[in-house]
Image (cartoon, grey):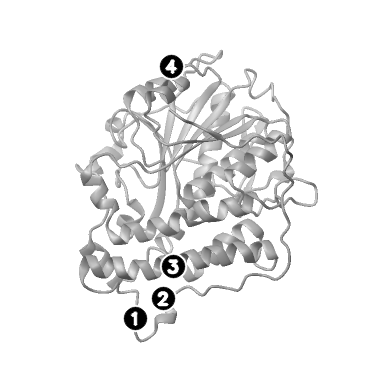
Amino acid sequence: MALDATHSTRINGIKKAHIANGFHNAATQSRAANNNDLNPENKKITFIVGTNVAAHKTLRDAVSALADQGIPCEIILTDALPKGPKLQEKLDRPEVRNFGFFDKVMIKKGYPLIESMPIILDSSGDLDGDLMYTPQQLADFYTSKGVKVTVEHVHDINDPAFIDRIKNDDSIARAYNIRNMQIMSQDLIDAFENKTMQNGLKSQIINIHPADVFEYPGTNTAFWMRMNGSTQNVWTAHVIDKGIDSGPFLDKTFRALKSGKTLMQDLCSMAPFAAQMIVNDGMMFLGGSQRPTIPQSATAEFSKKPSQHYTYAEHDDYIQAFRRGIVDVAPNNFIPAIVTDHFGDLTTPEAQTVHHILAKESLQWQNNYLKIYHAEYNELPPQYQPSNPGAYFIPVPLLPVGPLKQAPQPPSKPPPATYTP
């Protein structure tokens, strides 16, 4: 099982990154552009990452831990790309759209603002171990320190041109799929797995599944864990194959599923543990050793795996969840919390500006959601009580007075890389 994320460990004599309070404590690490002891071929770790908060929190911790050891990282950001009308119908359900809005609002609306502001560093000029950073901030910071970290947006990861690029990129050592919502084609899987290290190990792409893959294969797993009364919050690492959540088992990490938490909190709370699982695996691989993988059918847990995959909940499921006190996201708490993640508090003009913009966007969405929900179900969502609308709508703080700090913009700075098929 994955090691506890609150402790440092040693793998093949290399001291692993310490992840504290859910975020990587970068200040304690030594950094080198090419750590010859750990990564003699100077290979990179590739991340394919979905547009959601928990995935980006996991990425932040994992990239920091690896890059602080001089390991290059490649970040590929993806969008949800529904395949077929059935999946699109599920994604169009009002409740699914509501959760999706809050899962993406910081990434879509907050990141551009944050990246236009000076990056916040600690007193030693390193990343602050308690703060969240955008993928572009991570790339800019580590590249400036001599460790190549790149960011790229890919609309369709199964595009033949992208697959060819991965196939011909011999610098990839290992890849991790973190809550990317696109199903990978066999051609893309093969492209990641056609590489051999000098130490004889073969590259693989590992899926970080946000549940126990033996109990909750499929999607919307945080919802179904709560509905089924699970007591453990589990994330699984397994090799990706042509099936869905069916590849050979690699590792698990888990913690108690605490009462009174929202589904968003359930997902985000696992980020440091999932990141530690990735770091364990990646460092072992680069160091010349590898945790053995086991076909799922050969494990003792396979007998409890359901015959059908979990999928998005339906309207009646959400009504039942509400009656049982299961909450997907609490906007009034969530919006200030994700801003605080990036700034440490809400006292600076920069933090207050981002808070204002996200709250304003959220309030507009909440009004639209009431209309969408009513049009679909001819009723208002149970979270909204007409007698007390203030409990539902998020308050919008005033914009701060005075100029904002702006990040330095060298004239020659190239724009972020964008993949165009």
Q: Residues within 10 Å of mark 4 (few under 14, many from 20)?
A: some
Which mark, residue 392?
2
What residue is shown with label 3? 364
User: Is tag 4's residue or tag 2's residue first in the polypeptide sequence?
Assistant: 4
Q: Residues within 10 Å of mark 2 (few under 14, many from 20)?
A: some
In three-dimensional space, the C-alpha distance between marks 1 and 3, rounded to whole angstroms, equals: 18 Å
**Looking at the picture, which amino acid does disc 1 mark?**
Gln
- Pointer 1 and pointer 2: residues touching (CB < 8 Å)? yes
What residue is shown with label 1? 385
Residue 98, horizontal then vertical, whole percent: 36, 61
Q: Is residue 164 above or below residue 131?
A: above
Q: Front-most of 88 and 222?
A: 88
Spot the residue most to the bottom.
387
- Pointer 1 and pointer 3: residues touching (CB < 8 Å)? no
User: Is tag 2's residue or tag 3's residue first in the polypeptide sequence?
Assistant: 3
In front: mark 4 or mark 2?
2
Q: Residues within 10 Å of mark 3 (few under 14, many from 20)?
A: few
Which mark, residue 143?
none
Secondary structure of residue under mark 3: helix
Secondary structure of residue under mark 2: loop
Residue positioned 69% across, 21% down in the render: 36
Residue 205, horizontal then vertical, whole percent: 43, 28
Spot the residue most to the right.
124
In front: mark 1 or mark 3?
3
In front: mark 2 or mark 3?
3
Which mark, residue 194?
4
- Pointer 4 and pointer 2: residues touching (CB < 8 Å)? no
Residue positioned 24% across, 67% down in the render: 375
Secondary structure of residue under mark 1: loop
In front: mark 3 or mark 4?
3
Residue positioned 40% across, 68% down in the render: 366
